[in-house]
Amino acid sequence: MILAALPYWESTIIRVVLVLAAVLLPAGTFVYVFLFKMMSFMQSRLGPMEAGPYGSLQLLAEVGKSLQKEDIFPERADRTLFALAPYIVVGSVLLVYVVIPFGPDAWFANLDTGIFYALAVSSLSVIGILVAGWASANKYSLMGGLRAAGQLIAYELPMVLAVVGVVIQAGSLNLIQIVNSQANGSIFGFGALGNPFILTQFVAFGLFLMAAQAELSQAPFDMPVAESELVSGYMTEYSGMRFLLFFIGEFASAGAFAALAATLFLGGWWLPGLDLNANYMNVIGPIVVLTKMMLVAFLIFWFRFTYPRFREDQLQTLAWKYLIPISLANIMVTAVLKVVF
Amino acid sequence: MSDFLQAYLTVAVFGGTAGLLIAGVLGLGRLIRPSRPNPDKLTTYESGVDPVGSGFSQSQVRYYIFALLFVLFDVEAVFIFPWAVGLETYSYFGLVEMGIFVFILVLGLVYAWRKGVLRWV
């Protein structure tokens, strides 16, 4: 592969450019396809129609608008922390993408701790959110930040424990090897379709999706930004470009979780019938991954536009009394089946 | 440099890229956006009325017990991952060991549940 043959720094520069595309392209597509259009159609309206054909350039127009907005630091805010928060939130999203493989050679960094690293880095964003909520010196923001922290604490566990089921089956934390073992796997000897882990780990997939929904603060878990109670939660005092950074960060992390789900459960860049390690997979692979990401994101946003918001106590009850016991049971059942068969 | 360290160097480079990207976007905005602050604009937003007290107020952290439980279970997750990777080698021995480990943890969760701390106060 050409990329691997280059010296380290040259290939890293190319990878940096590619990762920006890999983060911003899905995020922009999600905003347009799901937030602007799918939500509008579900509510019997057209959504944005003016900027570009069918409003497809609406997001660019929003960026242009936000760039021109005055940058307001509230008088009482903690200026340093207030400015720092968007860096932490967006930075953590970008770092998740580092481990996601898009093809046999089309990866950014091949970490052996792959999925463990991804889960660790993705939960960094809660620090940024807490910092934003505190630094704003606003009661709405503080409430939003604290709610976000409580929510992420509760749903971190089902997510991590759901992933353990996949790790047991694959026997590796490395995402490239997880994709490999899905392609080469078989279910009780039937191996024509490989073994995309959604077939054997469907419980874990459900848990992962629910936890991702909560980690992303998407409705029905959107209490941290509940408009009707907290204005805009931890983002209340942010204006212009800084607000847009939080907004893009939210959709980019939806993309990150969708990509993780696609890699862990749907077979990553691999499709049945295609040669996993062939050179052409470096071109087809990214398209396959993006398609699978869109499928997962469709589910996430479908739930978002369908269900009403939970209460805060229902949120904790769901996590602690249902999801965590189920995920522990899933781990034990998977382990028993793995050892016995 | 070993491949192992090089992979993490890539991670560091990407982290730096994220910082530069945001700084670049905000810097670009600085060139074209206006800056006309006035006292009204800079007050804390509290639904249009003058803010009461400080925004850095004390508030009840209702999930204090949940946070303690979280630390417990998160450490547990750290122990489960290496076991999950090596399950093929550990075979029945590992299975029984982890069964005992998870059983004790579930016992703790049931205790907390019966104690009534898994309630939103």
Image (spheres, rainbow, N blue to C red):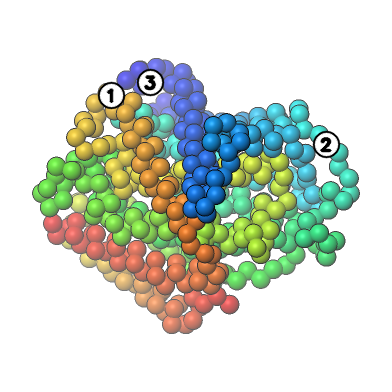
Q: Determine which residue is flagged by label 1.
A: A280
Q: Residue visible at 43% across and 64% down?
A: B73
> Toward the viewer: A43 or A316?
A43
User: On what subunit does the disc labeled 2 rest?
Assistant: B
Q: Say what amino acid the circle numbered 1 marks.
A: Tyr
Asked which secondary structure carries label 3, the reply is helix
Q: Say what amino acid the circle numbered 3 marks.
A: Leu
Q: Residue A328, relative to residue A130: is it above or below?
A: below
Q: Say what amino acid the circle numbered 2 marks.
A: Ser
Report, in whole angstroms, how far the alpha carbon at label 1 lies from the one at label 2: 52 Å
In front: label 3 or label 1: 1
Crowdedness of circle 1 by 10 Å Cα count: few (<14), some, many (20+)?
Answer: few
**First-in-chain label (3 vs 1):** 3
Crowdedness of circle 2 by 10 Å Cα count: few (<14), some, many (20+)?
Answer: few
Q: Determine which residue is flagged by label 2.
A: B35
The image quarter in which residue B53 lies: bottom right
Q: Residue visible at 75% across and 31% down?
A: B30
Crowdedness of circle 3 by 10 Å Cα count: few (<14), some, many (20+)?
Answer: some
User: On what subunit does the disc labeled 1 rest?
Assistant: A
Asked which secondary structure carries label 2, the reply is loop
The image quarter in which residue B19 lies: top right
Q: Which mark is residue A3?
A: 3
